[in-house]
């Protein structure tokens, strides 16, 4: 049977592939989640919703109560204007939101500007839409923060859509406000749409988060509950834009695919906006920062090129002269699961992605010992 063209350039997710391989290893540094539990107040509210029989379809865009809280959060915390609950779309995870956005914007041959390296699913979803990728180079010695080469490539690509992810997966980089404003300037000149994936927004150790949607109306702001509240398996994300045409297109795709996000999960997520839930997040971020600092101090003693990332829960060291695929395989044989950098883009060659989100300091020490030994 002939494979459809839209699938021929789509490959297995490298993160899922290596996470599967690492399941029986002693130390698993592959998974893109934290090891913390969902805040108790959210779990209790979800159980209550189940007991109350809130188990049926909701409106396709999500329950009004949740969309209202998301709208208020984005207006008050992110300073994004022009939003009310009708500008919000709730879906089964931020990944599906990104799929809906790209499929509602991109036609065959349209250019999508994509930082290199980037989260692996961006490339696959763009390929499903039959768009063309313009890669924007990033460099380990610059901490994977956009520089002149990045901006030149972006300017010359004349993209229909620009993908932006800060804090970043796989690098942990947090883009300063001045960098995002430069990206917005280029988007305005090219009449491009920006998709700003802000799923790691609250996991920042230094600096402050800045949303492109604050200053640019043709932005789709994507966020969710997976990383901040340790709810990866709950599958709950959202999109927001003052551009109602974009939200309505995405909503149309949603109605014909997943229908709506899980009902009782939406009701549970109402408690994510409480002080109690946010206190849990603060404690989690403090623990993650301690892990990051430990790994950075260890890597600084090796030949790896690494700048301290300011957010998310990844480090992405560059090991000059190494084949990242072979290096990751050798670590796997030594009981440490990591993900090679190449699947994230050509600028990821020679790098490995280490996720410290679900691993305590004792295990990180063992992993660092083995990685350091391999580097020697």
Image (cartoon, helix red, strand yellow):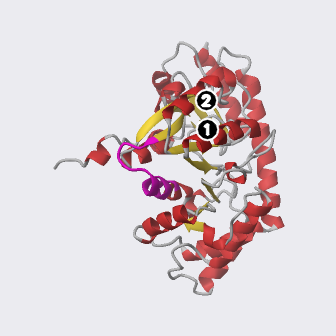
Secondary structure type for disc 1? helix
Q: Decide which of 283, 241 is in the foreground and name it.
A: 241
Q: Quadrant of the C terminus?
A: top right
Secondary structure type for disc 2? helix
**Left or right placement of residue 3 versus residue 280 in this view:** left
Farthest residue to the left: give it: 1
Residue 140 lies, with reference to residue 80, above or below; the image says above
Q: What numbered label is drawn on residue 186?
A: 1
Asked if residue 361 lies in the magenta stretch, the reply is no
For label 1, the crowd category at 10 Å Cα-Cα, with few meaning under 14, some 14 to 19 and many 20 or more, is some
Q: Is residue 359 visible?
A: yes
Q: What percent of the width, then of the height, locates residue 279?
A: 83, 59
**Left or right placement of residue 224 versus residue 106 in this view:** right
Q: CA distance from mark 2 to mark 1?
A: 8 Å
Asked if residue 110 lies in the magenta stretch, the reply is yes
Which of the 4 image quarters holds residue 146? top right
Q: What numbered label is drawn on residue 287?
A: none
Farthest residue to the front: give it: 189
Q: Decide which of 111, 206 is in the foreground and name it.
A: 111
For label 2, the crowd category at 10 Å Cα-Cα, with few meaning under 14, some 14 to 19 and many 20 or more, is some
Q: Residue at x 59, y 45 (%)?
A: 32
**Left or right placement of residue 324 versus residue 83 in this view:** left
Q: Decide which of 165, 268 is in the foreground and name it.
A: 165
Residue highlighted by disc 2:
151
Q: What percent of the width, then of the height, locates residue 28?
A: 57, 39
Q: Is residue 24 visible?
A: no
Q: What percent of the width, then of the height, locates residue 314?
A: 65, 37
The residue range painted magenta reads 98-111
Asked if the residue at tag 1 contacts the one at tag 2, i.e. Cβ–Cβ closer than 8 Å, the answer is: yes
Name the N-terminal-most of marks 2 and 1: 2
Q: What percent of the width, then of the height, locates residue 197?
A: 61, 49
């Amino acid at each position: 049977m002939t494979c459809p063209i839209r699938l021929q350039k789509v490959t297995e997710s490298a993160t899922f592939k290596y996470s599967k391989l690492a399941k029986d290893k002693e130390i698993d540094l592959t998974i893109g989640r934290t090891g913390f539990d969902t805040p108790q107040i959210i779990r209790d509210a979800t159980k209550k919703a189940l007991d109350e029989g809130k188990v049926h379809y909701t409106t396709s865009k999500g329950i009004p109560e949740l969309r209202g809280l998301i709208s208020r959060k984005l207006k008050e915390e992110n300073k994004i204007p022009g939003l009310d609950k009708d500008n919000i779309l709730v879906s089964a995870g931020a990944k599906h939101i990104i799929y809906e956005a790209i499929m509602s914007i991109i036609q065959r041959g349209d250019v999508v500007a994509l930082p290199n390296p980037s989260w692996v699913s961006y490339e696959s979803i763009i390929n499903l839409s039959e768009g063309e990728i313009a890669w924007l180079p990033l460099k380990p010695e610059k901490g994977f923060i956009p520089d002149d080469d990045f901006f030149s490539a972006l300017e010359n690509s004349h993209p229909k859509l620009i993908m932006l992810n800060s804090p970043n997966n796989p690098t942990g980089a947090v883009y300063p406000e001045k960098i995002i404003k430069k990206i917005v300037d280029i988007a305005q000149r090219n009449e491009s749409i920006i998709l700003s994936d802000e799923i790691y927004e609250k996991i920042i150790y230094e600096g402050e988060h800045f949303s492109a949607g604050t200053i640019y109306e043709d932005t789709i702001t994507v966020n969710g509950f997976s990383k901040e509240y340790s709810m990866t398996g709950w599958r709950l994300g959202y999109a927001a834009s003052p551009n109602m045409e974009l939200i309505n297109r995405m909503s149309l795709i949603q109605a014909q695919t997943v229908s709506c996000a899980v009902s009782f999960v939406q009701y549970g997520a109402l408690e994510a906006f409480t002080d109690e839930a946010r206190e849990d997040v603060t404690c989690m971020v403090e623990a993650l920062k301690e892990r990051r600092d430990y790994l950075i101090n260890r890597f600084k003693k090796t030949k790896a090129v690494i700048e301290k990332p300011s957010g998310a829960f990844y480090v992405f060291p560059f090991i000059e002269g190494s084949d990242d695929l072979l290096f990751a395989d050798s670590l796997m044989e030594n009981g440490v699961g990591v993900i090679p950098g190449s699947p994230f883009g050509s600028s990821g060659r020679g790098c490995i992605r280490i996720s410290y989100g679900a691993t305590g300091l004792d295990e990180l020490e063992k992993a660092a010992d083995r990685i350091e030994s391999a580097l020697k």
